[in-house]
Each structure stands twice: as structure tokens, then as C-alpha cells.
Amino acid sequence: MSDAPYFHDASGTVRFWVAVDGGNAVSASIGREALRYHFRTAEGADSLETFGQHVPEIEAAVRRRLAQGFMEPVMLREHDMRSAQG
């Protein structure tokens, strides 16, 4: 498994891994629309670049979902990102 995030064309998501609980890696993804709407990027913006600019916030959202009892793979939606601001 590669640790580098990548854009998965078929699903329209950035797929990535987050270290939790002593270094265990949890797989996760976030869609291009969630990235675009939450971070207010242009319609044609590079999703992987947007992801790279906001890794700490996105990883925190994954950890919140896991703390709420969600299981791997964690699929983030725009709502999951908004809860970080509240």
C-alpha cells in the first residue's frame, strides 16, 4: 500500500490514509465536490492539490468520524467538514 494520497477517477474521490492509535493506518476518501464546496475552490480546481493544502483539517474530520463509531473506510462528506467549524 502506498501512503501517498491519490485521485481515484472512477469514484471522483481523493483516497488517503490517516495514522491513528499508535500508527495504525485507516483508509479514507473525500469527494471532489466536498473539497470544492467546503474549501470554495473553482469548479476545475485540482482535487489532489486542494486536499494537500488542507490535510490537517481533513485528517481531523476522519478522526472525529472514527470517534463517533464509524468504521473503515471513512468516506468524508461536506457535512463532516462543516462540523469542524462548529
Image: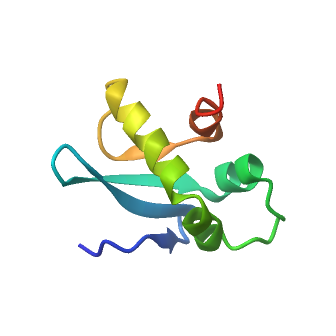
- Looking at the rendered image, the quarter that the N terminus falls into is bottom left
Image side of residue 74 versus residue 45, left or right: left
What residue do we see at 30% from left, 36% from top? 71
Whether residue 8 is visible here, answered yes or no, is yes
Can I make out residue 12 in this image?
A: no
Residue 10 % position (x, y): 53, 67
Residue at image position (58%, 58%) is: 54
Q: Nearer the viewer, residue 11 or 47?
A: 47
Foreground residue among 59 and 79: 59
Does 81 sit left or right of 75 as displayed? Answer: right
64 lies above or below 1: above
Left or right of 24, for residue 50: right
Residue visible at 42% across and 32% down? 64
Please say if 59 is above or below 43: above
Residue drawn at (60%, 29%) of the image: 83
Instruction: Identify the colour scheme used.
Output: rainbow
Residue 9 place in picture, x, y as percent: 55, 71
Q: Quadrant of residue 66 in the image?
A: top left
Quadrant occupied by the C terminus: top right
Residue 3: horizontal and vertical position, in percent?
31, 71
Q: Position of residue 5 (x, y in %)?
A: 43, 70
Numbered-mark total = 0
